[in-house]
Amino acid sequence: MEIREAKPGDESKLSSFLQEAWREAGPGAPGFTGATEETIEEIASIDFLERLLTNPKNKIFVAEDENKFIGFASSRESDDGFIELSGIIVLNSRLGEGVGTRLLNIVRSFASSIGYHKIMVKTEVFNGKAIRFYEKMGFMEADRAIEEINGIQVDLVILSLVI
């Protein structure tokens, strides 16, 4: 397995990965709250992924095994002085192999290398698996929030990691 920065030209494999992750997890799965088929089609579209990969504030990392993406981490530079971990997705079929840990570690290294000292991430309050993962990786609860995602009010926990 290789962990690397996603680059222009990866859009098709990213699209296939996102659609497969959605199919494996299913609607309503933690991390996909509020997502619909239409939402997934939009974020898996080549146009959306091209914009994501060329936005200088975004950094996308992928875990690749046998020429197939099995994991994804998206981060964004915040104007508030931290890196926002927009998400880590690992195919359900590859959970427990350390993919998420390796993706988070590369985001941490990237953030530190460009002078950031904090990473923030949001997840649903009921997503115990993600919360335990982030806490195991050193994150601490910093706040709670309620956000509307596709018309659904979602209770979120905001976790912070000082690096």
Image (cartoon, rainbow, N blue to C red):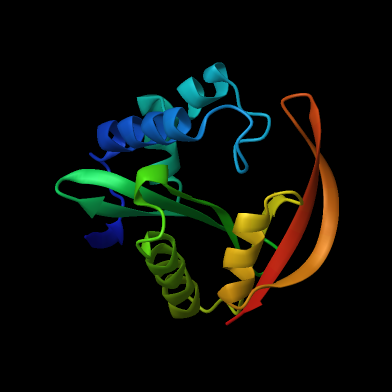
Q: Is the residue 80 above or below the residue 34 in the image?
A: below
Q: As rendered, which of 79 and 147 lies closer to the eye? A: 147
The image shows residue 50, relative to residue 76, as above or below, that is above
Q: Is residue 119 visible?
A: no
Q: Position of residue 59 (x, y in %)?
A: 43, 56
Q: Position of residue 28 (x, y in %)?
A: 64, 31
On the image, the x and y values in percent for residue 11 come to 30, 35
When the figure is inspected, residue 29 is found, relative to residue 136, above or below; the finding is above
Image quarter (top left, top right, bottom left or bottom right) of the C terminus: bottom right
Residue 69, quarter of the rendered image: top left
> Residue placed at 22% from the left, 43% from the top?
68
User: Left or right: where does residue 57 sit relative to residue 99?
Assistant: right
Q: Residue at x 68, y 29 (%)?
A: 34
Residue 50, horizontal then vertical, whole percent: 37, 35
Residue at horizontal 31%, vertical 51%?
A: 6
* Identity of the residue furthest to the left in this view: 66
- Tell me if residue 113 can be seen: yes
Quarter containing the N terminus: bottom left
| Quadrant in the picture for residue 128 | bottom right
157 relative to 41 in the view: left or right: right
| Left or right, residue 133 beside residue 128 | left
- Answer above or below: position of 153 versus 151: below
